[in-house]
Amino acid sequence: MSALRESLGFLTSRLRQVGIFVALILIVLLFQGLTGGILLEPQNVTNLVVQNSYILILAIGMVMVIIAGHIDLSVGSVAGFIGAVAGVMIVHWGWPWWAAIPACLLVGALVGAWQGYWIAYVGIPAFIVTLAGMLIFRGLTLITLKNQQITPFPAELRALGGGFLPDISGGTSVLEWLTVILGVGATAALLIQALKERRIRRKFDLESEPLVWFVIKTAFTALLMLVITFLLASYRGTPIVLVVLAALVIAYTALMNNSVFGRHTYAIGGNLHAAELSGIKTKAVTFRLFVNMGVLSALAGLVFTARLNSAQPAGGTGFELDSIAAAFIGGAAVTGGIGTVAGAMIGGLIMGVLNNGMSILGLGTDYQQLIKGLVLLVAVGFDIFNKNRSGGGGDIGKRFKLKTSPPPAAEKPAPAASETVEAGIK
């Protein structure tokens, strides 16, 4: 009984992180029932992954930008512009696909450097710079394409957006065995890593997660991965873009959790002034964040263009809204300093399931936009409510009679800059 009470207390303290995961499960179950089981059919699960892959790629970079206290409104226009550039390079100029891809990523980096310079070194707010960028690169997309679509693209590039890993069984098996091997291997690696991290944290007396909750969480995550593996293997196997996305998630999770750059990003979003006083080169970090955002926008543009087999004047429209919503629904704080790549992925999946489920039900775009807007509003409202509940004070905390009584400023000395940065990182 005490273990259960301890687990419930821990879940209450981690309401933000647990809440979005529970929300994803409930939304999946809701649409699974409303669609008569169509949502979790193997073909639809594969389509769900492929159709939302570019939004998830954008969400990785967007959550990093938001953690640092900025925003990027231009990612959709940049993705559309890179698709147009790829069309001109490959179809009109005759470039091979393997040369055009790195060239497009380089163009994306230059776009990010352009915007990052104005934000980091000139001091113009990111909202203004990227709003201008949204207009600039949408205009450049129309100019590049001359308001006409460019098609077709070579099969190798199309595979990036809609291709699958080869079937090692030759199509003679009910399940695609390469997908099974990859899925089981990834699940085993996840379990080993989770146990390793818990052992290290216990060794240094840093572990606060109850054993009961750790076992339930880890077992459920492993079971979920195996179910997804089975569903993918039952259709056509592993989409190539899923492999790309998995590599990005692993790399960027390690970057944000285990690198100096990641800690500096959290510090800047937590308290910019304290980060500067601590010697962090805030301008350089901000500049690199937007260069990275430009590269990921370019990759998302290539994936989207490859999936449609067409570079279109309207390509990328609305991508910025979905990626920003994914980051906030996934637990990123409006004020910066808080957020994770994994959370952004969950937020992106919530948006994807909403889009897919409502499309299956035949809801028009008017109702889809309405529902997604309400979900975003509830997610941000929950974030603010949870912050006040945990001791931030403010009107919401007073209205719900939350216990928020920080010590008076006169009775508590101001923290050192290094302490403030550490608090921001946490």
Image (spheres, rainbow, N blue to C red):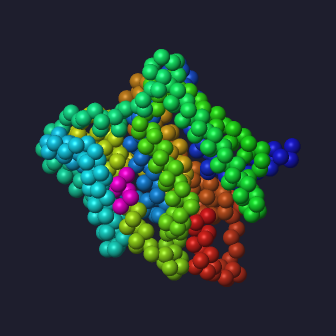
Q: What kind of secondary structure does the magenta stretch mostly adopt?
A: helix
Quarter of the figure with residue 111: bottom left
Query: Residue drawn 39% across and 34% down?
Result: 51
Chain part drawn in magenta: 291-296
| Residue 215, above or below 124 | above
Q: Residue at point 61% right, 64% down? A: 426
Q: Nearer the viewer, residue 271 or 278?
A: 278
- Residue 335 lies, in percent from the top left, at 50, 62
Decide if residue 218 is in sight here: yes
Q: Point out the image quarter for the N terminus.
A: top right
For this view, does 385 lie left or right of residue 50?
right
Relative to 99, 287 lies left or right: right
Q: Residue at x 86, y 47 (%)?
A: 2
Position of 175 relative to 303 (above/below): above
Foreground residue among 91 and 149: 91
Residue 292 forms part of the magenta stretch:
yes
Q: Position of residue 127 (x, y in %)?
A: 36, 61
Q: In the rendering, at what x and y percent does residue 207 appear?
A: 74, 57
Quadrant of residue 53 within the rendered picture: top left
Q: Is residue 356 visible?
A: no
Give the answer, above or below, for where 203 lies relative to 279: above
The image shows a total of numbered marks equal to 0
Q: Residue 163, how many percent across, how many down?
A: 37, 32
Q: Is residue 382 left or right of residue 125?
A: right
Q: Is residue 319 left or right of residue 349?
A: left
Inspect the magenta stretch and tell me whether residue 367 lies in it.
no
